[in-house]
Image (tube, rainbow, N blue to C red):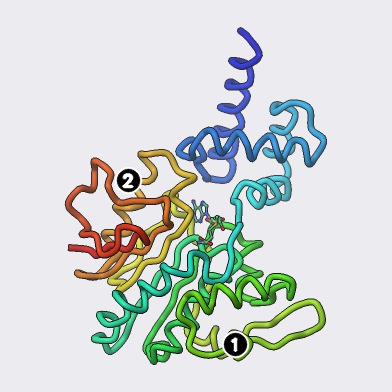
């Protein structure tokens, strides 16, 4: 057995240990990205071999927590891909506004910047008070940050630019309070948001959503998990409900050909048929 094959055995044992101990099945994650994140974690913690990590993973849940935090790549920003928010204003909001109450599932919300951005759009379009937003992620650490809505001031310049490009109607500073090195999002924006832990690998679906937002999450999954999760989204949407994915993601998978029609192929907005 050469080193590469040995490493593969170690990875499989690690994944199996995590699955059996904590119920998270990373065998359905893109192996390239899993390996990259694993190597990054080993370096960070000064661990020489993958197998050296396994005892701590099995016996110390805190090790799993930090590993999960490292693995989950919670990279995000406010109004990421600003044009997509414009398209949401133009093509999704008119349909949403026909509903007396609007249910939105924001899956993989990370530390919340994206869900506050969506809340701002809904406020500006006069829909927010009719909305119930379920913002979920499988990483409790980032969910806590999302709930607090406190972000470093140094990123606000970039977010303000994004907000303007996204068709913002006011000034982004109307939506936060500045406190030294950080900004705190207005609590009014949180009023209709429920933050909750939800694992896309196997947790139950939600019901009758008018919009599901899940951007830059499916890219980390292999084909079969992507299909499974998209199937859950299809089941969770009300008829004619919208699905908004990341720019590198798509619904065009063999198991799903007929569930969605494309509303905007560039900004990856789909509608359940
Ligand atoms: C790159 S971030 C995307 C954040 C945001 N949607 C955006 O596009 O800016 C990916 C997020 O997906 C979450 N995630 C990854 N696998 C998940 C799973 N199986 N269930 C729920 N959330 C997951 C991660 O914890 C992370 O916060």
Q: Position of residue 36 (x, y in %)?
A: 62, 36
Identify the secondary structure beneath mark 1. Answer: helix
Q: Residue at x 26, y 70 (%)?
A: 241
At x 50%, y 75%, the residue is: 165
Compute the Cα span from label 1 to label 2.
Answer: 37 Å
Which-is-in-front pick, marks 1 and 2? 1
Q: Residue at x 57, y 45 (%)?
A: 22
Quadrant containing the C terminus in the rendered view? bottom left
Question: Residue 87 sits in which quadrant?
Answer: bottom left
Residue at 69%, 34% (x, y): give it.
39
Specify the quadrant that holds the N terminus: top right
Q: From the Cβ of disc 1, is ligand 1 less than 8 Å away?
A: no
Q: Based on the displayed image, in which of its 4 quarters is residue 222 positioned?
A: top left
Q: Which comes sooner in the sequence, label 1 or label 2?
A: 1
Q: Report which residue position mark 1 lands on.
A: 175
Q: Crowding at label 1, few (<14), some or many (≥20) Cα neighbours within 10 Å?
A: some
Question: Is 113 placed above or below 261 here?
Answer: below
**Along the viewing direction, whichever of 9 and 273 lies nearer the viewer:** 273
Where does the image place residue 167, in percent across and percent down from the top left?
45, 80
Q: Which residue is mark 2?
A: 227
């Amino acid at each position: 057995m050469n080193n590469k094959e040995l490493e593969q055995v170690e990875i499989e044992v690690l994944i199996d240990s995590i699955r059996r101990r904590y119920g998270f099945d990373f065998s359905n994650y893109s192996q390239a990205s899993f390996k990259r994140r694993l190597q990054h974690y080993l370096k960070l913690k000064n661990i020489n071999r993958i197998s050296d990590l396994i005892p701590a993973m099995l016996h110390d849940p805190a090790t799993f927590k930090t590993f999960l935090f490292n693995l989950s790549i919670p990279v995000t920003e406010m109004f990421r891909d600003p044009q997509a928010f414009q398209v949401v204003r133009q093509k999704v909001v008119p349909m949403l506004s026909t509903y007396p109450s609007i249910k939105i599932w924001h899956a993989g919300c990370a530390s919340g910047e994206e869900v506050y951005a969506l809340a701002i759009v809904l406020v500006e379009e006069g829909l927010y008070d009719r909305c119930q937003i379920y913002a979920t992620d499988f990483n409790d650490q980032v969910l806590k940050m999302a709930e607090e809505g406190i972000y470093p001031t140094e990123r606000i310049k970039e977010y303000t630019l994004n907000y303007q490009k996204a068709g913002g109607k006011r000034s982004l500073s109307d939506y936060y309070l500045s406190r030294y090195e950080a900004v705190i999002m207005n609590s009014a924006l949180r009023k209709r948001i429920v933050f909750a832990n939800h694992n896309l690998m196997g947790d139950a679906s939600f019901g009758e959503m008018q919009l599901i937002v899940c951007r830059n999450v499916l890219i980390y999954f292999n084909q079969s998990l992507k299909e499974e999760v998209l199937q859950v989204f299809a089941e969770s949407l009300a008829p004619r409900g919208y699905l908004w994915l990341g720019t590198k993601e798509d619904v065009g998978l063999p198991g799903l050909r007929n569930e969605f029609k494309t509303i905007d192929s560039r900004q990856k907005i789909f509608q359940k048929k």
